[in-house]
Structure formats: structure tokens, C-alpha cells
Amino acid sequence: MNDTMADYYEKHFEAYFERTVQIDPTPFLKPFADRLPAGAAILDVGCGSGRDMLWLNNRGFAVTGLERSPGLAGLAEERAGCPVIKGDFTEFDFSRLAFDALLLCGSLVHLPPEQLPVVLDNILKALSTPGWIFLSLKAGRGQKVDQWDRIFHLWQTDALEEVLEKRGLQVLDFFHSISAAGTGEQWLGYVLGCGPLRAESKAHRVKITNPRAKPKIWISRPFFLDSRGEVRFPPSAFYGFFPCN
């Protein structure tokens, strides 16, 4: 993350907090949480407003955050009632930690493609085996600069999954969805497994093929295949919007 982005989150932490804290994280946290053992220890890397920590904490998980911005770290700790480590995930020594699961919700969106594998390798040092990860990045090609001069690096599934495969990470759930902020931006969301997992940890994938259609994502399991091999969901399947950053 360059100095411009770091300065944004340090100088405008209150505005960022207000913009993101009220978004309902259920659509992507529920399939992640459903994979985890009860009471799992989770590290929320780049925890931002603490929104996701609060959701997980309320469901019995032992959550710790890590946040570079001192202002955001303080607000997140107060909001979620969880400890927050003040640190920069590009430099932090994750080998000192041991967690059952890692939450990387939009936290790596500012990393150039050549830096993401190196930073991810460092973060993965905090993951126990077996372990679980939630990772989301913005979909597209190249990069995008927003109205606050933040640079977002965009990803295609094939390039990103090559990075994940090289690290021995198994795709358990995949979402290709639309930002809840109404910007039309697309997100790639992954629930990943590391190490030997339970036999029922079957991969589920859902992709929005028409970005102009009403944005929906699947967050329920199980699914089944019809006679033509098409993916079908039970009537209880829940749909919603993917959160934004």
C-alpha cells in the first residue's frame, strides 16, 4: 500500500468508518462461518470499522483484528469489543500468531498483482492447519482510481486462482457479485481451505454472468445438479448483496 492510501485511512478514518460500518456482512460471512468449528479463533486482517469482527464475535467466535490506521483500530475495537493489533500487514511478523481462520475482506485491494503473493505468504504464517480463509478482491482488469484517489487493483479469476493454487489453498465457496454500494463494481469472494479438511468440504461456485441483472449471490448450501448438469438451489437458499469497501 502506498503512502497516499495509507494517509487516506489515517486522515479520513471517521468518514470511512461511517461509510462501511452499517453494511450487513451476512451474505459473505455466513458461508465462511458455516465452515468453521465452533469458537474458532479468527484474525481479521485490515479489520477497518470492526463491522465483521462484531458479526463474528456475536456468533461465538474468538476474533482479533489487525489494522494499520490508529483511528480505525480504536473505533473497531470499541465497536466490536474485540482486541485489535495495530500493525501494517505488509510488514507485520505473522509467524508469531496462530489462528484457525483468516478474514481478508477487501483488505488486499490496494496491492499491485506482483506484491499480493508475497504479502499473502506472510499473512498465511498466522494460519493453523487445517485452516480457513475468506478473501475478497475487486473483479476486472488493470486498476481503478476512485474519487478519493485510492488505487484498486482488479483481478480475473484465473490469475487469482493460480496464486491460490500455488499456495495449496482449496476453493470451498466462490462468489462473483455486485457491490452493495450501488457502484456497479464487481467482487470476487472466496472461502478457502488449507490442509486436510472434513470430507463434506465440497466446493461450491456461483457466478453472476450478467452484471446488468439484479445482483444476487448465493450464500446457502447444499446445491444440486439437475438432469442437464445445471446448478440448482433448494427453496431455502438465501440471496443478497455483496458488501463494498
Image: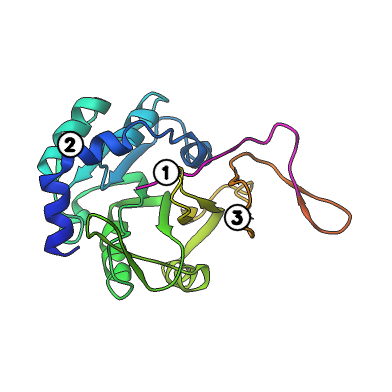
Residue 146 versus residue 70 in the image, above or below: below
Label 1 secondary element: loop
Judging by the rendered image, the residue that carries numbered circle 2 is 14
Image point (62%, 46%), residue name? 214
Secondary structure mainly formed by the magenta segment: loop
Q: Is residue 86 left or right of residue 60?
A: left
Farthest-out residue, front:
147
* Precedes in sequence: disc 3 or disc 1: 1
Q: Nearer the viewer, residue 13 or 111?
A: 13
* Precedes in sequence: disc 3 or disc 2: 2
Image point (36%, 46%), residue name? 103
Residue 194 in view, yes or no: no
Judging by the rendered image, the residue that carries numbered circle 3 is 212
Label 2 neighbour load within 10 Å: few <14, some 14-19, many 20+: some
Q: Quadrant of residue 51?
A: top left
- Numbered disc in front, either 3 or 2: 3
Amino acid carrying label 2: it is Glu
Q: How far is mark 3 from mark 2, CA to CA? A: 32 Å
Amino acid carrying label 1: it is Ala
> Residue 117 placed where, x, y %?
33, 70
Residue 67 versus residue 58 in the image, above or below: below
- Residue range of the region highlighted in magenta in the rendering: 232-245
Q: How far is mark 2 from mark 1, CA to CA? A: 18 Å
Within the magenta stretch, is there residue 66? no
Judging by the rendered image, the residue that carries numbered circle 1 is 181
> Residue 42 placed where, x, y %?
34, 40
